Image (spheres, rainbow, N blue to C red):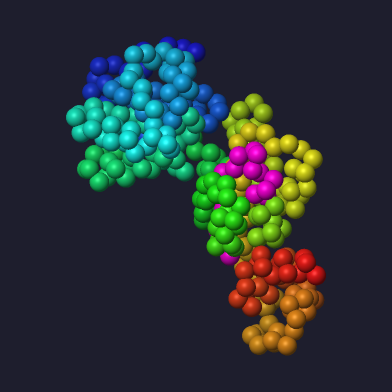
Amino acid sequence: MPHFEDMINDEEKNLILGGTLYLVATPIGNLSDLSARAIKVLMGVDVIAAEDTRNTQKLLSILDIHGKELISYYEHNKRARGEVLAEKLENGLSVALVTDAGTPAISDPGEDIVRLCDERGIPVTAVPGSCAAINALSLSALATGRFAFEGFLSTNTGERRKRLSEIAREKRTMIFYEAPHKLSATLADLLKTFGDRRITLCREMTKRNEEIMRTTLEKAVSYYETVAPRGEYVLVLQGEEELPPESRPTDTEWYTSLSHEEHVSAYEERGLSRMDAIKAAAKDLGLPKSVLYKELQEK
């Protein structure tokens, strides 16, 4: 790696504002994605707050940045360390906040210190760069105009399923983060909740072994029954599709005498796929699609 001493001179150092928190995005895989501005800020600030100081120290060594005060800031110490950092900022020091990879404060305890700074009138600015959610969305081949970021689902099975049921009718593209040891269970819950639909699974983005899998939920569940998940995943899930007007009967009471299975079959006879028919029937009945899907599966 080249030396970066010529990237920041005394005049540029003066552009680093004392008493300001800088949210500095770091690469999610490829070191070349670190911006020139990010390097200048890391060189110029007084203090660097890091998710894991060991990982950040490695990055700083590669950049030939030495002698910086490093403070750990992560989920389990964010309250106490947030106060420490706020005090330094109020005393006129400049602070950069970084995570191990990606943009701070996105599904990250950095949001807490941004809120604390807002409460105390401390200026905060962002030094943009890589964000795994946006990278995955752009690669997904799904609709990108409107999307909902869900981050990590709960590790508790009941809470995870409850959250999924709450967003069962979401029409926007949805983005989730997931760890490898939870992937199979999460995919199974997604299939039960949303039925079969398109999903893109992204892992090792920007790295040599980058893998982008554009598939369906059923195929993804089947695939990971025999293949062990590896690495952190970003899941991009298709939102619920609006049914074409011609596929829905104008008489809203036509189905009252039908069983749920007959109700779904009536839509299938109009040319809808099984999953689209379940969606339509669930909407008529005011039921979560996952409930109707499960009921029909158990018969």
Left or right side of 98 for 139:
right
Quadrant of residue 6 within the rendered picture: top left
Q: Position of residue 81 (x, y in %)?
A: 33, 33
Residue 82: tell me if it is visible: yes
**Residue placed at 33% from the left, 41% from the top?**
114
Depth check: 130 or 53 in front?
53
- Residue 269's place in the image compared with 19, above or below, is below
- Residue 54's place in the image compared with 262, above or below, is above
Quadrant location of the C terminus?
A: bottom right
Left or right side of 212 for 176:
left
Quadrant of residue 18 within the rendered picture: top left
Confirm whether the magenta stretch covers residue 68.
no
Depth check: 193 or 8 in front?
193
Quadrant of residue 177 within the rendered picture: top right
Left or right side of 253 for 67:
left
Left or right side of 111 for 178:
right
Count of marks, rendered view: 0
**Residue placed at 71% from the left, 58% from the top?**
196
Residue 104: tell me if it is visible: no
**Residue placed at 43% from the left, 38% from the top?**
75
- Residue 138's place in the image compared with 2, above or below, is below
**Which region shows up in magenta?**
169-187
Q: Position of residue 159 (x, y in %)?
A: 56, 55
Confirm whether the magenta stretch covers residue 178.
yes
- Residue 107's place in the image compared with 145, above or below, is above
Q: Position of residue 192 (x, y in %)?
A: 69, 59
Q: Position of residue 30 (x, y in %)?
A: 55, 26
Depth check: 76 or 150 in front?
76
